[in-house]
Image: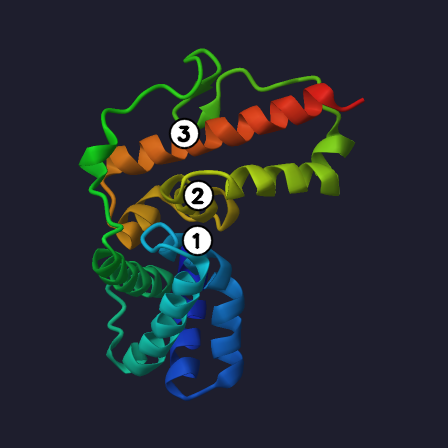
Amino acid sequence: MEHALQLEEMQLVEALRGGDERAFEQLIRMYQTALLRVVQMYVSSRAVAEEVVQETWVAVLNGIDRFEGRSSLKTWIFRIAANRAKTRGEREGRILPFSSLGPPEPAVEGDRFDHGHWASPPTDWPEQRLLGQETQTVIENAIEMLPDTQRAVITLRDVQGWSADEVRNALELSETNQRVLLHRARSKVRRALEEYLGESP
């Protein structure tokens, strides 16, 4: 599976180097939304985030010939975006070091959520409701309400399906910060789901 993904990525890189517009459009479809979420961690507004993402795509096109494959293509793209966003955020005076966030605090009771998994998964949620559009909207809204860093991490991990290492490398987070941010984000989304499913008939 991993070999197949690497082969597909190499083909995508070659297509981009050859000026294939469809390959570039595919890349935008794959990563545009997640890039916006990541960039919004560092800048003051969505409009600025959209500018930074546009700059990122230009940098990707201009730099694809120099891509050496030492990381995955997506990690390389997201690192470009994060670095550009940090630079813009510093100019805006928005960047806060992670150390200023204070020590990790438990987001939910330890017996309910542990190491990225539900310790006691709910058993009385009807499958149809979980799969329904309404529930999907509740999840999306809960993610949108998260602080920027939590929103970016949960989007990359749980929506985009990235590994912890990929997220850490792309966002330049420590293992501990990545884990704490994901834990808090998942806990808040779970709480929103519980409230919705508890109130619904």
Q: Which residue is mark 2?
A: 151
Asked which quadrant contains residue 120, the reply is top right
Amino acid carrying label 1: it is Arg
Q: Which type of secondary structure does the marked residue at label 3 adopt?
A: helix
Q: Is residue 165 left or right of residue 99?
A: right
In the figure, 47 relative to 167: above or below?
below
Q: Which residue is found at the position 37% from the left and 62% from the top? A: 74
Q: N-terminal of the two: label 1 or label 3?
A: 1
Q: Which type of secondary structure does the marked residue at label 1 adopt?
A: helix
Closest to the observer, 28 or 199: 199
Closest to the observer, 46 or 164: 46
The answer to whether the residue labelled 1 contacts the one labelled 3, judged by CB atoms less than 8 Å apart, is no
Closest to the observer, 84 or 78: 84
Q: Which residue is found at the position 72% from the left and 21% from the top? A: 199
User: What is the basis of the colouring in this image?
Assistant: rainbow
Q: CA distance from mark 1 to mark 2?
A: 7 Å
Amino acid carrying label 3: it is Arg
Residue at the bottom extreme of this rendering: 18
Q: Which residue is mark 1?
A: 37
Q: Residues within 10 Å of mark 2 (few under 14, many from 20)?
A: many
Q: CA distance from mark 1 to mark 3?
A: 17 Å
Q: Which residue is mark 3?
A: 184
Amino acid carrying label 2: it is Arg
Residue at the right extreme of this rendering: 201
The answer to whether the residue labelled 1 contacts the one labelled 2, judged by CB atoms less than 8 Å apart, is yes
Closest to the observer, 122 or 84: 84
Horizontal and vertical percent for residue 131? 72, 38
